[in-house]
Image (cartoon, rainbow, N blue to C red):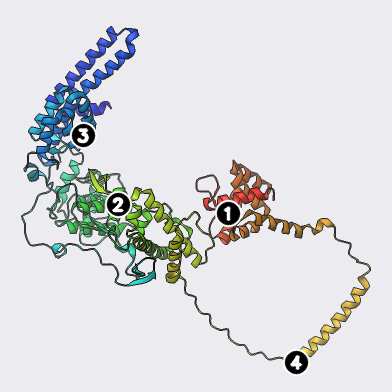
Amino acid sequence: MMESIKNFVRSSGPASRVFLAIWLFLCALITVSFLEGSPKENIVSDIAALIGCYLLFSVMFLIPAGTLAQTRRAKAGKAETRYSEKSYWITLLLAAFLGTLGAHRFYTGKKATGILYLFTFGGGGIGWIVDVILAAAGMFPDREGHIIPFPGRGKQEFDLRPQPAETSEAPEASEAPQQAAEPPALFSEIEVPGAPEKRQEIPARPSAQDAFCEKPSVSAGLSETEAVNNEAPLYTARSYFRDPSAKFFSEMRLYADVVGQKAEFVPFTQYGPTYDSMDRRQRAWYFYWRAQVRKGEYPDTDLSYIFVHTYELLSGCGWTQAPDGYRQLRSLWMSYRERFPKLDQYLVGWIFDFARQYQLDFTMPERCDLPLPGQAAARDLLLDRHSDEKPLRLPFPLICSLCDYPVTDSRFYQDGHQQLMQEAVPRVVALADAVLLKEKGRGIFAVYGPKRPRKQRYYMFQSAICPEANERVFLSVKAYSENEKLRNYVNQLVRYSENVLRSLYGYRGRLRGIELEPELSRLIESFLKKEYTPKKTEKAPPKQVEIKLDFDSIASLRAQSDAVRDALEVAEDEMQYENTPEPEPAAQQGPAAETETRGAQLDETGLTEELRQFWEALTDLQRQALRAVLCSGDPQEKLTELAEEAMSMPELLIDEINDAATQFLDDILIDTFDGAPAVLEQYADDLKRAAEQLGGE
């Protein structure tokens, strides 16, 4: 706190310090007056008056001091100045005529201080006068600290990077605007309810080269600020006044054209790596490696070297056309992501921000296992691109981002059905969207999604080292990712689709708690059965074997068999009086009756056929262990007791139960990932009820 106050005072000008001094003097004076002359019987009212004075003095002097300091910081370096899009004339007129009510502060986004002005008559008139002077001088800052300049002035000084002269020469890649890939021309048909049409086009099964996950792209233009020209010099020419990364940027300008000679690889591991953190040998390897990368070759190296080169590309070093910089970033990422999975956590978001900064089309690579940008606003932009599609063609990664069920972690998905799910689930979402269009004239996003855009905070190039790193902007986009109604609907579609596919591929286990309209469920099941029922391979007819009988051998074997039978009959007659069996005790007739009783009890529990078969397959010890997990307050202690009695271990008991569950339910039953063993939610209620009804069995 003290350090923040020191930094604030240090960055303030003389005028701000005068206001701060007056505020401190008045606060000290009123405090001393309170301590000296406040009688005990009026202590409550005096404290209230003291707090009121503190508040009034703060509005009168601290707010003007903060506004002046904010203006000074914004104007500290001309190249660093940010200009607001707010109107100069509206700000000035509101400040002049309605400034005592805080109207100009409400307009510029400073709502909190606007409310204080409203109740203190513009900070006793002092804050109002300061604001009018700053607004008239074209120096009043908005909420983000961006100056509201004279008309026409901000446009001349806004661009951060130098603008080259207009020219018609451009590489072929930038001659025409990038276009989104066309959807497949082939469609399959399925009957959906509704008039007048009875058929709705659903995307056909994609080929191996045409998967849904290959085409998520979004026009990534800046909406809040002016577009930056696609051309830039080999390095960024701008001032880095008071920039903590200034040394890296200045060295980057020096090393931009260095072509390293062949050098020996030297390990390099550094948090926040820069040139300064490399020694001489590491720097020699880096420039050699960078020269190879610029030629399209990607030798083995360490992660920290990759990050330094990434920072260069994000800062405008190493490319002259923005599409070329975008291509280099993507190639660098895809060439090293297999060896360094950590790159996915950063490069996805940084490449998205790069495309957005230079108004390029952000296209996810042709792989479904790649993550989406981490911030919700970025995912919402990607989702919004598909909002006008009829039917909706959401890629699999975007569907997963809307689904609370971890579909990629499910046993069915992990058992070799990744491609099946990645292909089938987007088509089911398209089918559901088509049904809604028929029934209500609106698709999934319109029926279940948010109704209007929302201003969302977004941070550019989080944790990177580049000029725009961690810069906060505001995006106006519908908050699809946080809409519970939309997430619940997509969750139901995905879970039901997996259940149908499980049944088609012979998996007994099912996901519970799915609520979809019967007609939609019927259509989805019919569609998936039609498109994804596994083809049965025809078995070759068995070869006919010619059999030859040896009748002489058969006659000989028959004679020997008759002789043995006669001998056994004589022996049995002699022993029948010596070994007359006693009547079977009633206690020994119990197992059959017990089995019959147990079957009747299981019928009363209402278990599904799979769960009933699973329960009957368990041993008594395993049932006791399962009952301990379901019903015991401390299952670990109970499992330990049971294991010690059986001379086993709790972990082995759990593994045996999970092995049986895998056989009958196609899923594990007891989860131990969080420490304490627990039965999976979809089975817990049914098994607990059965365990309680069966009692000590």
Mark 1 or 3 closer to N-term? 3
User: Which marked residue is nearer to the observer: mark 4 or mark 2?
Assistant: 2
Of residues 78 and 136, the one drawn nearer to the viewer in this rendering: 136
Locate residue 409 relative to residue 295 in the image: left or right. right
Pointer 3: what residue? 110
Amino acid type assigned to the residue bearing label 3 in the image: Lys
User: Which marked residue is nearer to the observer: mark 1 or mark 2?
Assistant: 2
Mark 4 or 3 closer to N-term? 3
Pointer 2: what residue? 380
Marks 4 and 1, how far apart in space?
A: 57 Å
Mark 4 or 1 closer to N-term? 4
Whether residue 65 is visible, yes or no, is: no
Mark 3 or 2 closer to N-term? 3
Tell me the element at label 4.
Answer: helix
Q: Residues within 10 Å of mark 3 (few under 14, many from 20)?
A: some
Tell me the element at label 1.
Answer: helix
Report which quarter residue 99 is drawn in: top left
**Residue 655: mark:** 1
Eyeballing the image, is 538 above or below 177?
below
Q: Residues within 10 Å of mark 4 (few under 14, many from 20)?
A: few
**Residue 551: mark:** 4
Q: Where is residue 91 in the image (x, y as percent from the top left)?
A: 12, 36
Report which quarter residue 291 is drawn in: bottom left
Marks 3 and 2, how far apart in space?
A: 27 Å
Marks 4 and 2, how far apart in space?
A: 85 Å
Locate residue 536 relative to residue 50 in the image: left or right. right
Mark 1 or 2 closer to N-term? 2
Q: Position of residue 188 (x, y in %)?
A: 36, 71
Mark 4 or 2 closer to N-term? 2
Report which quarter residue 469 is drawn in: top left
